[in-house]
C-alpha cells in the first residue's frame, strides 16, 4: 500500500492492524454463530454450500484489487472483505475436517 498506492506508513500500519484483527474475528464469530444457529452445526450438509457461497464472495472481493490505483481505503476495504470471508469459512472447514477424521474410525 505504501509503495503502490502512495499511502503514508502510519496510515498503512493502522489500517492493516485494524483489518487483520477485526475482519478475522468478526468473520469467525459470524461464521460459527450462523452455522450453529441456523444449520445446527458444521456437520449439516448445507454448511458446505454456505462455504461455497462465501468462497465465491471471497473471489469477488479479490477481483477489484488489481484495478485500484490511488484509493487505499477502497483497497483495504477489499482486503477486509477477503479476510472476513476467510475467517467465516475457516472454523466451518476445520470442524468438517475434524469430524471427517473421527467418522472413519
Image (tube, grey):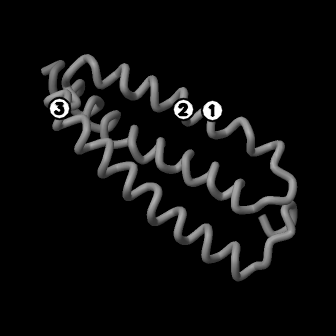
CA gap between label 3 and label 2 equals 22 Å
Label 3 Cα neighbours within 10 Å, binned few <14 / some 14-19 / many ≥20? some
In front of the other: 65 or 92: 65
Quadrant of the image for the N terminus? bottom right
- CB under 8 Å between discs 1 and 2: yes
Q: What residue sits 19% from the left and 27% below the top?
A: 39
CA gap between label 3 and label 1 equals 26 Å
Q: Can you identify the residue that label 2 sits on?
A: 57
Q: Can you identify the residue that label 1 sits on?
A: 60
Quadrant of the image for the C terminus? top left
Q: What residue sits 69% from the left and 77% below the top?
A: 11
Q: Can you identify the residue that label 3 sits on?
A: 41
Helix, strand or loop status at disc 2: helix
Helix, strand or loop status at disc 1: helix
Q: What residue sits 74% from the left and 40% below the top?
A: 64
In front of the other: 39 or 102: 39
The correct choice, above or below, for 8 with respect to 25 in the image is below
The correct choice, above or below, for 19 with respect to 83 in the image is below
The correct choice, above or below, for 68 with respect to 39 in the image is below
Residue 23 falls left or right of residue 78: left
- Percent coordinates x, y for residue 85 in the rendering: 47, 42
- Percent coordinates x, y for residue 80 in the rendering: 56, 54
Amino acid at each position: 500500500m505504501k509503495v503502490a498506492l502512495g499511502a503514508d506508513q502510519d496510515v498503512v500500519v493502522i489500517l492493516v492492524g485494524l483489518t487483520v484483527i477485526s475482519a478475522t474475528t468478526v468473520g469467525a464469530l459470524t461464521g460459527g454463530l450462523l452455522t450453529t444457529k441456523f444449520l445446527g452445526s458444521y456437520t449439516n450438509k448445507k454448511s458446505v454450500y454456505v462455504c461455497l457461497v462465501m468462497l465465491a464472495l471471497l473471489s469477488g472481493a479479490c477481483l477489484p484489487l488489481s484495478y485500484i490505483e490511488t484509493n487505499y481505503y477502497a483497497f483495504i476495504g477489499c482486503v477486509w472483505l477477503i479476510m472476513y470471508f476467510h475467517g467465516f469459512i475457516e472454523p466451518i472447514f476445520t470442524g468438517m475436517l475434524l469430524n471427517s477424521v473421527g467418522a472413519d474410525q
